[in-house]
Image: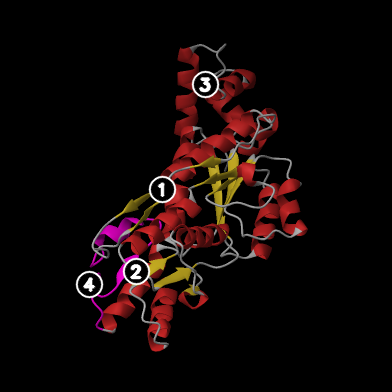
Amino acid sequence: MSILLKDIAQATGFSINTVSRAMRADPKISVQTKELIQKKAQELGYIPNSVAASMRSNHSKMVGIISADSANPFFSEVVRGIEEAATKADYHILLASTEESVKKEADLIKMFLCRKVDGIISMPVFDNSNSHLDLYRNLKIPFVFPGRRLEGLVNHSILHSDRDGQRKVIEHLIANGHRRILYIAGPKKVSNTIDRLAGVAEAYANNALEVDPDYIVEASGHIEDGYYLTNQALNRGLGFTAVACFNDMLAMGVLKSLYENNLKVPNDIEVFGYDNLYMSQFMQPSLSTVDVPKYRLGYVAMETLLAHIQDSNLEYITKDFPTRLVFRETTR
């Protein structure tokens, strides 16, 4: 049986109006009275009616989080930052993942709107069709894109220098004497893939070299892709001397393939990941990678969203965090 305000009033001897104001921490109610009422409410097992509270304040104190790939630990680190910032602001999150599906992304946006969330943090699929862009253009609530972008809405993005980070990786490998570098790209429906491929092209151009399309392969971003594509490249006789990967997950698959093919890392082939997942430092050999501030990305995304919830006229401004190369045992 649910405990109502009238039950607390009856148990404490105060009016329902006084109990209601005390539960809302009304400053006009004395500290002693508030403590007495709130303690009794806790003893009785009272659960506040969040729907009624949101109707009074015009805020649900909930935010919808649309993650991208539940199999990738990168996103759990971002969500951890989001959740901590939300908790500090007394907000709750509703979390779901698209698994990189445009349809599921659209369905989740509609679902969150039905739940009356105050804002949305989304890691969108890179689809620039009008129907997809309109999902966000037509939103009446604030939204932020941590780590990804959509054309025409980049001011809603908090990015992490994808083009620059990938350029630095390829330039480092070229400086080490590599000319046959296998690059395992991510899926084309992810904006990070587009930007990192641009970084690859820029690195080659800066060194007066041409990109050989045979040395660029596309993957979904999972471990098994790195394993399969490396085996395939070896069977094709590409003769690469280094591998740069779209993310650390792919690099893990690459290392397994090289090990099974009796190729020494880094003496025979150097390997570079991207994202600096927590587990990368514990691999054998430990993985050289690009550090992305994942937790900070999520934390700042939530802080930014909250600022726009509080001020609907606040201007959206693109943020772009720097990245850095982390050298470990898979590179010389």
Q: Which residue is mark 2?
A: 178
Residue 267 placement (x, y as % from top left): 22, 72
Neighbor class of circle 4 (other Cα within 10 Å; few <14, some 14-19, many 20+) is: few
- Is 29 or 37 nearer to us in this picture? 29
Residue at the spot x=49%, y=68% of the render?
A: 210
Mark 2 or mark 3, which is nearer to you?
2
Q: Which residue is mark 4?
A: 267
Residue 233 placement (x, y as % from top left): 41, 82
| Marks 2 and 3 in Cβ contact (< 8 Å) | no
Mark 2 or mark 1, which is nearer to you?
2
Residue 141 placement (x, y as % from top left): 69, 40
SS at mark 4 in the image: loop
Tell me if residue 219 comes above or below residue 2 in the rendering.
below
SS at mark 1 in the image: loop
Q: Which residue is mark 3?
A: 12
- Is 271 or 128 nearer to us in this picture? 271
- Amino acid carrying label 2: it is His
Mark 4 or mark 1, which is nearer to you?
4
Which quarter of the figure has residue 39? top left
- Amino acid carrying label 4: it is Asn
Q: Earlier in the sequence, mark 1 or mark 3?
A: 3
Q: Looking at the rendering, in which quadrant would you find the C terminus?
A: bottom left
Q: Which residue is mark 1?
A: 323
Tell me if residue 123 comes above or below residue 118 in the rendering.
below
Q: What's the magenta region?
A: 262-285
131 magenta-colored = no
